């Protein structure tokens, strides 16, 4: 029996005649941080949008906790916690109102005491009556992540969550992700930071030109490609890193 | 971990509370919606006896409805779409239609508020009184008129993605509706334009409002205007729904 919390099989996504995603398959297991890495335009966002149910693939299957995102979208989405890349809450709403909105949508009871405890947990007890737009980048990220988790979803999707964060906030988020993993959440993470992928991901998939090139643990991937000429050429300080492997596999041409 | 699907009513209630809070915090936009109808009510005081109270009220309500659909609703939708507010809601277990119905419910409340404020302003500034049936029918017809402008606003955000372009287009259409509509109907822009305005979205809404406020004057022309109003609402709504994209990216 398949115990994956997210199963993506043979995903094909087209934009007109252009095929952005080609037969992509991978799975995310409970208690695992799975990184989806790729250069700009590689097909990461399209794949993630299909998992979120925002984009309908031309073919392939996506199941979340056993529910098809196509046939049972509400059930599938009820099992997902999402942190999108962009700030995505109504700027007029107070932090407490944003939390109550998503609690209501997810059917989570959020009386005042629970709300205070919720905010205290993310060290924002004094910010309940601040507008979301008045928070710092790190604070916004904490609220956004906490909202993604408020219904205790088995699968969490994090779309470049550390972009624009200072090192302290980034480290704090990594700790948070590791706590989520320990609690059994499966996490699908997209990132451009190879340092992040190497530090927190249990497995990674490198995707380029719409295809999955390789899926493995970061350590195994480095070990496997350590002696590839392209990887050695990409190495800047002698020691082979995941970034060198990534450049070796996807090339050093800047993508638009 | 258990899958919890909230009831549609619970999710809708949460959306509605957030949308009403957003509208309440945008009080300046609400004031802008009211400022032109109230200015007309005050400045047309001397014309009430010549034009008739129902005509003055209906013109003010029509302009207020135009502002709701073109200035308030469409700009809010364009901005939230650009910020990704809709995408964030759509990845939650909530039906897409309930996101939009919640938004529209707030606008219906705005239609009621604007219509009642014009009625009160008409009485307060111009001593305009009509029959209770007129007030009731006027309010009912305001919903139909409001639907045309909401649908027009939806069509604009359906056809244009960029929020700045939506804003400029809406302001332009609003300005044209007020200037050409109002002055055209008063015969100040010539007979041809006057006739064109009569069957424009502005003219038909103003006509059914005017007849609705005086139910005893409702005639076949008013019925044609009502049918035209429904037609505009359907066409604009079709365009707005058909081409609407949840994301501006």
Image (cartoon, grey):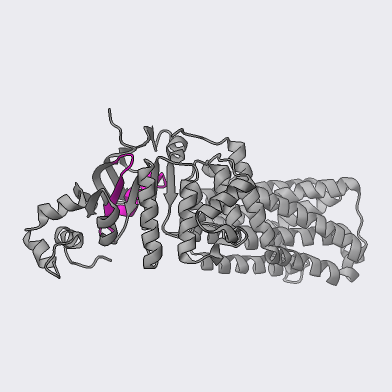
- Residue A48 lies, with reference to residue B36, above or below; the image says above
The tally of labels here is 0
* Residue drawn 46% across the image and 65% down it: A137
Can you tell which quarter of the image residue B8 is in?
A: top right
Q: Can residue B203 be seen in this view?
A: yes
Please tell me which residue lies in front, A59 or B165: A59
* Residue drawn 91% across the image and 49% down it: B131
Residue B233 is inside the magenta segment: no
Quadrant for the N terminus of chain B in the image: top left
- Residue A193 lies, with reference to residue A76, above or below; the image says below
The percent position of residue B181, horizontal first and vertical second, equals 71, 65
- Residue B103 lies, with reference to residue A73, above or below; the image says below
Residue A29 is inside the magenta segment: yes
> Which portion, as a residue range, is magenta?
A28-55
The percent position of residue A167, horizontal first and vertical second, equals 36, 67
Please tell me which residue lies in front, B202 or A171: A171
The percent position of residue A134, horizontal first and vertical second, equals 56, 66
The percent position of residue B141, horizontal first and vertical second, equals 76, 48
Can you tell which quarter of the image residue B194 is in?
A: bottom right
* Residue drawn 51% across the image and 35% down it: B5
Residue A207 in the figure: left or right of residue B25: left
Q: Can residue B217 be seen in this view?
A: no
Quadrant for the C terminus of chain B in the image: bottom left
Residue A178 in the figure: left or right of residue B91: left
Q: Farthest top residue?
A: A1
* Residue drawn 39% across the image and 37% down it: A70
């Amino acid at each position: 029996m398949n115990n994956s919390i997210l199963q993506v099989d043979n995903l094909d996504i087209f934009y007109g005649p252009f095929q952005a995603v080609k037969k992509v398959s991978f799975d995310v297991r409970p208690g695992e941080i799975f990184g989806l890495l790729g250069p700009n335009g590689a097909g990461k966002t399209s794949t993630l949008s299909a998992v979120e149910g925002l984009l309908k693939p031309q073919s392939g299957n996506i199941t979340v906790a056993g529910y098809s995102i196509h046939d049972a979208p509400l059930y599938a989405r009820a099992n997902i916690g999402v942190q999108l890349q962009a700030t995505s809450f109504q700027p007029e709403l107070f932090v407490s109102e944003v939390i109550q909105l998503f609690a209501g949508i997810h059917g989570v009871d959020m009386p005042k005491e629970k709300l205070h405890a919720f905010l205290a947990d993310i060290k924002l007890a004094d910010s309940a009556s601040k507008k979301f737009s008045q928070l710092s980048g790190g604070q916004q990220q904490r609220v956004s992540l906490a909202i993604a988790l408020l219904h205790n979803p088995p699968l969490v999707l994090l779309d470049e969550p550390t972009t624009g964060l200072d090192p302290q906030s980034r480290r704090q988020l990594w700790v948070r992700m590791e706590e989520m993993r320990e609690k059994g959440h499966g996490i699908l993470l997209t990132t451009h930071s190879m340092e992040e992928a190497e530090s927190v991901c249990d497995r990674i998939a490198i995707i380029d030109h719409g295809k999955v090139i390789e899926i493995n643990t970061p350590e195994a991937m480095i070990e496997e490609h350590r002696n590839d000429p392209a990887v050695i050429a990409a190495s800047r300080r002698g020691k082979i890193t995941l970034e060198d492997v990534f450049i070796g596999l996807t090339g050093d041409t800047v993508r638009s | 971990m258990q899958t919890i699907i909230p009831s549609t009513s619970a999710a809708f209630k949460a959306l509605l509370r957030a949308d009403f809070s957003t509208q309440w915090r945008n009080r300046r936009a609400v004031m802008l919606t009211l400022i032109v109808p109230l200015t007309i009510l005050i400045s047309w005081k001397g014309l009430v006896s010549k034009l008739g109270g129902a005509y003055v009220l209906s013109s003010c309500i029509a302009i207020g409805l135009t502002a709701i659909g073109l200035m308030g609703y469409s700009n809010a939708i364009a901005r939230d779409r650009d910020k990704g507010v809709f995408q964030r809601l759509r990845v939650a277990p909530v039906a897409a239609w309930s996101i939009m119905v919640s938004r529209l419910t707030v606008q219906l409340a705005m239609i009621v508020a604007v219509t009642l404020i014009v009625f009160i302003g008409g009485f307060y500034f111009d001593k305009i009184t009509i029959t209770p049936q007129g007030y009731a029918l006027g309010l009912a017809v305001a919903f139909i008129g409001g639907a045309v402008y909401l649908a027009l606003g939806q069509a604009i955000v359906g056809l244009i993605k960029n929020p700045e372009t939506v804003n400029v287009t809406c302001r332009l259409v609003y300005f044209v509706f007020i200037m050409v509509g109002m002055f055209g109907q008063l015969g100040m822009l010539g007979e041809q334009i006057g006739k064109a305005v009569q069957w424009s979205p502005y003219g038909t809404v103003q006509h059914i409002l005017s007849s609705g406020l005086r139910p005893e004057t409702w005639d076949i022309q008013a019925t044609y205007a009502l049918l035209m109003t429904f037609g505009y609402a359907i066409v604009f709504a079709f365009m707005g729904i058909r081409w609407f994209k949840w994301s501006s990216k």
